[in-house]
Amino acid sequence: MLKYLKRYCDILGPSGMEDEIRNAIIEDIKDSGCEYEVDPMGNLTVFKKGKKRRDNKVLFSAHMDEVGFMVKYIDDDGYVLFNSIGGVDRRVVSGRRIIFCESNTHGVVASKAVHMQTPEERGKCEQISDMHIDIGARSRAEANEHIMIGDCATFVPNYTEFGEGLIRSKALDDRFGCAVLVDMINQDLEYDTYFTFNVCEEVGCNGAREVAHRLRPDIVFVLEATTAGDTLGTPKSKRACALGEGAVLSIADRSTIYNKELLETAVETANEKGIKWQYKNVVAGGNESGEYQRTASGAKVLAISAPARYIHSESNVLSVNDMQSVADLAFAINERSFN
């Protein structure tokens, strides 16, 4: 899993620009004996034949896109105004280094300097609509030599191993899930299994909705990163989940009430295999599960997540052990028949 993770995290791929990450995944699975196709939206769907057939169609899902930014205006002095792609907290944007996907142009996100702020403005975080990107241009014409309206950007790749078994990077949500699925596809499987690498999860789960209509799975396991709350000053009752405590199993979030039968199966499997796991004890967030649950003929769904600090920022932080727990649990669950 880890041999794929850094390469995937370093790829620039905000929602709507997943071509490069999809091509990297195809390169890594094409010799595994699987069948794959890319639909008109850009979702990559994979079928891997196992030793046995199932009566039910089981799907493992991850999304390829990451949060980012889109150019909306370039002013006369060459400064770039922008919108966010996906749920980016404005508190983690100002002062960050970004890179434009189309041209590899680098820039820095800027906002009004503290000594220029009024007393009313001080201590408040500016709206993203009031920030701008400085690419070193001195005019609109000079900026247009490198970028144009509609161009997209992400945080500069910064994959780093630090602490005791921790990884910091942009886009760990959900390149981690992609790496786990690729690792599964490249192993011998007990049962026939479907996999999907979806587009545009960060802007409304549109890719998963198309896959649900086309594939009509009976059971779906979504591999995701989810917000860890084990940060300074947060009481344990509100932490949702914590790094180092294993794979996260959700009971409900803002878009889904997860299937109790699948949840019990996951808990039973984890305990049997000695895989570390934890409940997500706060109803918050959401992911592709909701689309699979309510689209087309519907499906039983369960999210298996890795806890991530500082999610949707330039420095997501995940534990290698937690990621391995998710991978181990996903593989062990897939050894069940679900007939």
Image (spheres, grey):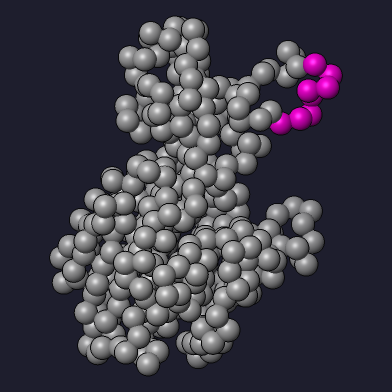
Which residue is outermost to the front? 296
Q: Is residue 136 magenta?
A: no
Extreme residue toward the right, this view: 119
One can see residue 127 in this view: yes
Snapshot quadrant of residue 101: top left
Residue 23 lies left or right of residue 13; in this view the side is left
Q: Residue at x 36, y 73 (%)?
A: 216
Q: Nearer the viewer, residue 321 or 287?
A: 287
Q: Position of residue 197 (x, y in %)?
A: 34, 60
Judge whether residue 274 can be spotted in this image: no
Residue positioned 34% across, 19% down in the render: 146
Work out whether 245 lies above or below 159: below
Count of residue discs = 0
For the C terminus, give its image quadrant.
bottom left
* SS assignment for the magenta stretch, majority: loop
Residue 162's x, y, as percent?
A: 52, 51
Q: Is residue 122 magenta?
A: yes
Q: Quadrant of the N terminus?
A: bottom left
Residue drawn where x is 40% and y is 89% of the image: 338
Residue 232 position, x and y percent, is 75, 52
Q: Foreground residue, 115 or 255?
A: 255
301 in relation to 316, above or below: below
Q: Is residue 183 above or below residue 117?
A: below
Work out whether residue 129 or residue 155 is closer to the camera in this orientation and state it: 129
Q: Residue 54, percent across and down?
A: 30, 88
**Is residue 87 positioned above or below 238 on the image?**
above
Question: Which region of the structure is painted magenta?
Answer: 118-125
